[in-house]
Image (cartoon, rainbow, N blue to C red):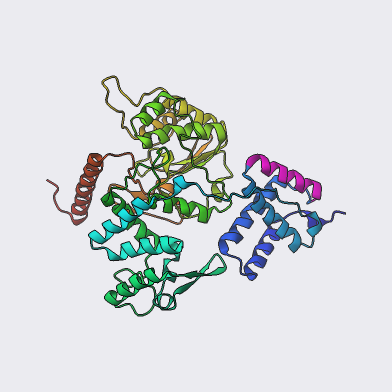
Amino acid sequence: MQNENDILTQEHIEEYAAHLREQERAENTVQKYRSDLAALRRWLGGRPLAKLVLIQWKEHLALTYAATSVNSMLAALNGLLQFMGRGEMAVKPLRIQKRLFCDEGRELTKKEYVRLVETARGEGNERLALVLQTLCATGIRVSELPYITAKAVRLGRAEISNKGKLRTVFLPDKLRRLLKRYMLKAGCTEGAVFVTRTGKPLDRSNIWRDMKRLCKSAGVEPDYCWFSEKPMPLFLQECVQSWRELCPDYEIKEWNEKNYDVADIPYVEEAYKKGSYGFVADVARLDILYQYGGVYLDTDVTLLKSLDELLYQPAFVGVEKWGNINTGGGCGAVAHHPMIREMLEYRKCFHFLQKDGSRDTATNGLYETIPFLRHGMKVDNTMQIINGVTIYPSCVFHPYDYMSCEDSRTEATIAKHHFYGGWMDKQELHDRQDTQRMYRSILKRMKCGTDIA
């Protein structure tokens, strides 16, 4: 029997969110449930809650999302129903066959791990070498390193609290001996073992920066990303880990030569044969996005917020500070979006290999911006809606300026594109570093009022 309380309102959602906080649920979980229930409310369109209607909602989700994502949304729904005293309306989750293995292609090889540790020691960076050994010996996340304290080393175990759960991680004896020796040299008697010069615990950004530099020094090449038989570098793995932490209910799919036909588009095939994997992804992502829909991120993108707030629209993309489109930093669309098709068709007009045998190494910004210009886009780094695509200013996906190396995050920032440069060869990386130094020098002199000439 229906009553007026069976109409789902925003007040119901907020009351349930307050209840979850009282139950000491993690804030990320609370926000995830709020987002899922808001989506349900929009779908209901004012219809009352009823068992058959909610089964239809479940079927609707199953056509759009992965099974794990569907079940997380149903968990939010069932929790709300119990809270409202309408538990009889709860719907059963989808049945899932659990995976009992992980993909070896995502792991760092032992040989590369040893090379990274030895390189760090050779450069006199004992702290970074021990960070690597601690992560690999314990299996903890980078964000959990502050729990490796002087007390934990003495006891041989660390008590780690993450996402409302407490677990004990044991430290192997060999690792403890190494950490004690390091603590003695550093004068560490209490608090976190791994700290900055100012005494603050190392955070993810500190470690990623050092890892990125170490990978280059150790010869662990950065162009493993996506289309490559080689494993993904540690720095990129940490970027992807940020997606899992902030979007735990999303299905994260790695596209590579095993599940995507690189021979379908001449530009892609030519770039793949030359080992220029970054250029493969530039075009392949448009093809995949058009066919299947979803959200795309380059592997050198760190998420800072959940992507949920972007999913209400048919398509979105971001620009760099110069105002040009860059889908690598973050983009999304429903399947068969006309603007994504237009971008894809424009890319198909070009070849990676030129008639003289040279390679077309123009970055994707040129090719991706031109289709939007044809529809009246202004290259002024502002939010615009062009042909059904929301274009976000650089602060949303590209707050990092790879020329000045400045990070201009705002409250609107959702992700940080690191511009890792995996598609560059050693000479191109060296040239970019020289250009960056010159650019920063000019900026500094301009700010100081010094003549450039």
Confirm whether residue 373 shows in the render. Answer: yes
Residue 104: give x, y in percent of width and height: 47, 47
Q: Is residue 227 left or right of residue 310?
A: left
How many numbered circles does the render carry? Answer: 0
Residue span colored magenta: 50-64
229 to 346, vertically: above or below: below
**Image quadrant where residue 238 sits:** bottom left
Q: Residue furthest left?
A: 453
Task: Give whichever of 129, 235 is nearer the camera.
Answer: 129
The residue depicted at 32 percent of the width and 24 percent of the height is 353
Position of the C terminus by quadrant: top left
Residue shown at 60% from the left, 56% from the top: 32
Residue 316: image location, x then y, percent: 50, 40
Query: Which residue is farthest bottom?
Result: 189
Q: Which residue is drawn at 31% across and 66% down?
A: 127
In which quadrant is the N terminus drawn?
bottom right
